[in-house]
Image (cartoon, rainbow, N blue to C red):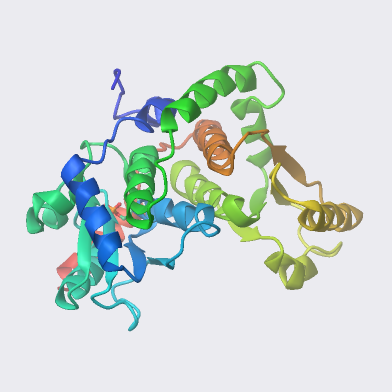
């Protein structure tokens, strides 16, 4: 990979397109996946926390219409009872030392699952056989390693379910082109970040853009140290909509992540929800990035919102790299072991 300054979140986010194509699944691992498919795997469980968990959520949403076995995500230290030795688990932890991920991974091994790990080091790597291990380059922030983790999980799951591997090099080209267009338009990430400076964004997605909404919330939390929320349509039409009324706090900013693949009914839901929020005095933002595939659309929007989150960190005068409270919590918990 070209020079990436690992002390600078701007530099790591800028390298998103390149990172997307820098992990290759070794042939032995791909062969193992084919073998597992042939013996009849019953499900795929992606284990991970925080920045290491989000890729699994994207893959679940993106492949839900093509996967013939369930793909589930576990963000906890135990596994559902139905995950047995006919399941495959993929434990993702950038550091390789996250307590909950290690616990669920150990549980998977005890149950006789075929276990894969994706990590840059730590206990997770040293524990496992080389064939079922994908080692990430070290010294990134876990959340900045998203494109590396995404490509590894995507290709692993595609091998496991017998789906042709997505060509991420085409997507890399589009991402690189788009960034120049955004910078030169009213969509410039710096301009968008200004809208978030004095308001609390609620990112609202649907289907494959629901995890993108969640990722945006987490990036604003961790990079810009600011409060943000996320939700999804249609579910938000049955609860959250009731909180968007005139007597409530107008510093809340609904940010609708609109897909070109919505279909008529979902489009109507988004449009009517937007109208209702406007009538109640809110000023929703709509973000839409045209694309030829769902995977590309999700990645384009993620790349864009990642850039917005670091611009917001600059505007707020905070360091997007540091995660002091996460570290404090982890070290306090360690002392209680
Ligand atoms: O972004 C972060 O630093 C966190 O959300 C971490 O990803 C999270 O605490 C889990 O750690 P790891 O990714 O090392 O498993």
User: Can you tell which quarter of the image residue 8 is in?
Assistant: top left
In the image: residue 16, left or right of residue 295 = left
User: Can you tell which quarter of the image residue 330 is in?
Assistant: bottom left
Q: Nearer the viewer, residue 30 or 197?
A: 30
In the image: residue 76, left or right of residue 209 = left
Residue at x 41%, y 50% (from the top left corner): 55
Residue at x 43%, y 39% (from the top left corner): 166
* Residue 143 position (above or below residue 90): above
User: Can you tell which quarter of the image residue 305 is in?
Assistant: top right
Residue located farthest toward the bottom when viewing the structure as drawn? 81
Q: Is residue 308 visible?
A: yes
Q: Is residue 321 visible?
A: no
* Residue 268 position (above or below residue 176): below
Q: Quadrant of the N terminus?
A: top left
Q: Position of residue 299 (x, y in %)?
A: 52, 38
Q: Position of residue 111 (x, y in %)?
A: 19, 78
Q: Position of residue 112 (x, y in %)?
A: 17, 74
Residue at x 23%, y 36% (from the top left corner): 139
Disc count in the image?
0
Q: Position of residue 236 (x, y in %)?
A: 71, 66
Q: Quadrant of the C terminus?
A: bottom left
In the image: residue 74, left or right of residue 234 = left
Q: Nearer the viewer, residue 139 or 62?
A: 62
In the image: residue 113, left or right of residue 239 = left
Residue located farthest toward the right when viewing the structure as drawn? 279
* Residue 323 position (above or below residue 147): below
Residue at x 66%, y 33% (from the top left corner): 192
């Amino acid at each position: 990979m070209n020079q990436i300054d690992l002390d600078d979140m701007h530099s790591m986010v800028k390298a998103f397109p390149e990172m997307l194509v820098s992990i290759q699944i070794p042939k032995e691992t791909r062969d193992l996946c084919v073998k597992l498919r042939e013996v009849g795997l019953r499900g795929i469980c992606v284990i991970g926390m925080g920045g290491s968990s989000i890729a699994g959520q994207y893959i679940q949403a993106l492949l839900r219409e093509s996967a013939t076995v369930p793909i589930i995500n576990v963000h906890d230290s135990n596994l559902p009872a139905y995950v047995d030795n006919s399941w495959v688990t993929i434990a993702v932890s950038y550091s390789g030392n996250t307590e909950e991920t290690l616990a669920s991974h150990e549980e998977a091994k005890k149950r006789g699952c075929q276990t894969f790990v994706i990590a840059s080091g730590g206990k997770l790597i040293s524990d496992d056989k080389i064939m079922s291990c994908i080692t990430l380059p070290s010294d990134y922030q876990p959340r900045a390693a998203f494109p590396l983790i995404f490509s590894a999980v995507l290709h692993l799951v595609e091998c496991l379910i017998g789906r042709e591997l997505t060509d991420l090099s085409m997507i890399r080209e589009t991402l690189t082109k788009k960034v120049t267009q955004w910078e030169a338009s009213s969509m410039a990430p710096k301009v968008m970040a200004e809208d978030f400076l004095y308001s609390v964004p609620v990112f609202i997605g649907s289907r494959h853009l629901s995890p993108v909404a969640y990722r945006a919330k987490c990036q604003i939390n961790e990079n810009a140290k600011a409060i943000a929320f996320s939700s999804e349509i249609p579910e938000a039409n049955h609860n959250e909509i009731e909180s968007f009324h005139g007597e409530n706090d107008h510093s809340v900013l609904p940010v609708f992540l609109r897909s070109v693949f919505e279909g008529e009914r979902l489009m109507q839901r988004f449009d009517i929800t937007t109208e209702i929020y406007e009538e109640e005095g809110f000023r929703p933002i709509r973000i839409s990035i045209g694309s030829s595939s769902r995977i590309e659309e999700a990645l384009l929007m993620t790349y864009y919102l990642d850039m917005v989150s670091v611009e917001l960190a600059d505007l707020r005068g905070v360091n997007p790299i540091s995660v002091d409270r996460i570290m404090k919590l982890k070290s306090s918990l360690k002392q209680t072991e």
